[in-house]
Structure formats: structure tokens, C-alpha cells
Amino acid sequence: MAKASLAWIAWRLEDHPEAEKLASEALQLWHGMDDPYGFDWMALCPLIAIALDRQNSGAAIGFARGLLTENQHPLPEKLLSRIRKACDEWQIGAQENAAANLASAMKVARELSYL
């Protein structure tokens, strides 16, 4: 949890390399647990924002898919519906729409203090 929190701080300070490192470490630790931690959004939201900032929509969608896995704490529907839509659009080949919807989702994430 501490690594994910520090990743969020690094992201807010625009230290993207440090944010990526810490968020990735948090995910690795959580996913290595016998009962994986269900709050991946804490690490994935900064990773999505960084990937979108770099215009790497494929990576952003890959991270977003992690928010939709079964063992995750449910996100607010206002946020979750946009993430699902972005992932669905990516799946059917509508990459520009997917990226736009994921960017919209990250705006909602900021509004709701998830990012």
C-alpha cells in the first residue's frame, strides 16, 4: 500500500519514472500474495495516466483491463462504465475512441479522488 501511495505522490509531482517503478513494485508484491490485494486501482490509475500522457494507448488499455478483474474492489459505476467502454472499444479496433474514453475515465478518476 505504501508503494502505491508513494507512486501516486510521484505521479502528482510529475516524476513519471519513479511513479512507474513504485506502482509496478506494488502490483508485483500484491500479485505475489496468497490472497492478492484487491485495490490494484491505487497503482493502476497512475500507470494509466502516465501511459495516456505518453500517448501509449495500448499500454493504458492493458493497465485498465487490470481494473476489471474479478478480485478487485468495485469502482464507482461512473468510473467503471467508462473503463469498460474503453476496453470494449479497443477490443473491436476502435483505438481512437478507446483512448478518448479512457482519458475521460481518468478525468472522472480525478474528480472522485482515485487519481
Image: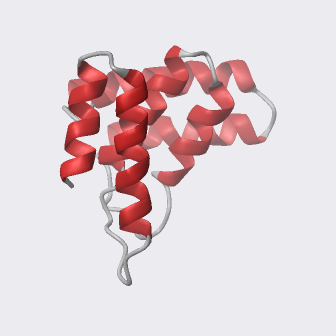
Residue at x 64% of width, y 26% of height: 57
Q: Position of residue 86 (x, y in %)?
A: 59, 34
Q: Nearer the viewer, residue 61 or 11?
A: 11
Q: How many marks?
A: 0
Instruction: Say whether residue 105 is visible.
Output: no
Q: Is residue 29 above or below residue 52?
A: below
Residue 61: image quadrant is top right
Q: Is residue 13 in sight in this rendering?
A: yes
Of residues 79 and 42, the one drawn nearer to the viewer in this rendering: 42
Q: Residue at x 52, y 42 (%)?
A: 64
Camera-side residue: 89 or 20? 20
Image quarter where the N terminus lies is: bottom left
Residue 39: image location, x then y, percent: 30, 57
Above or below, 31 relative to 68: below
Please provide percent x and percent y for residue 91. 75, 42
**32, above or below 14, in the image:** below
Place residue 9 in its image quadrant: top left
Q: Which quadrant of the rendered structure holds the C terminus?
A: top left
At horizontal 66% and vertical 42% (from top left) the residue drawn is 88
Where does the image place residue 101, in percent across and percent down from the top left?
Answer: 54, 24
Residue 59: quarter of image = top right
**Residue at 32 percent of width and 57 percent of height:** 74
Q: Find the residue positioned furthest to the bottom.
A: 34
Q: Is residue 97 left or right of residue 76?
A: right
Report the colour scheme.
secondary structure
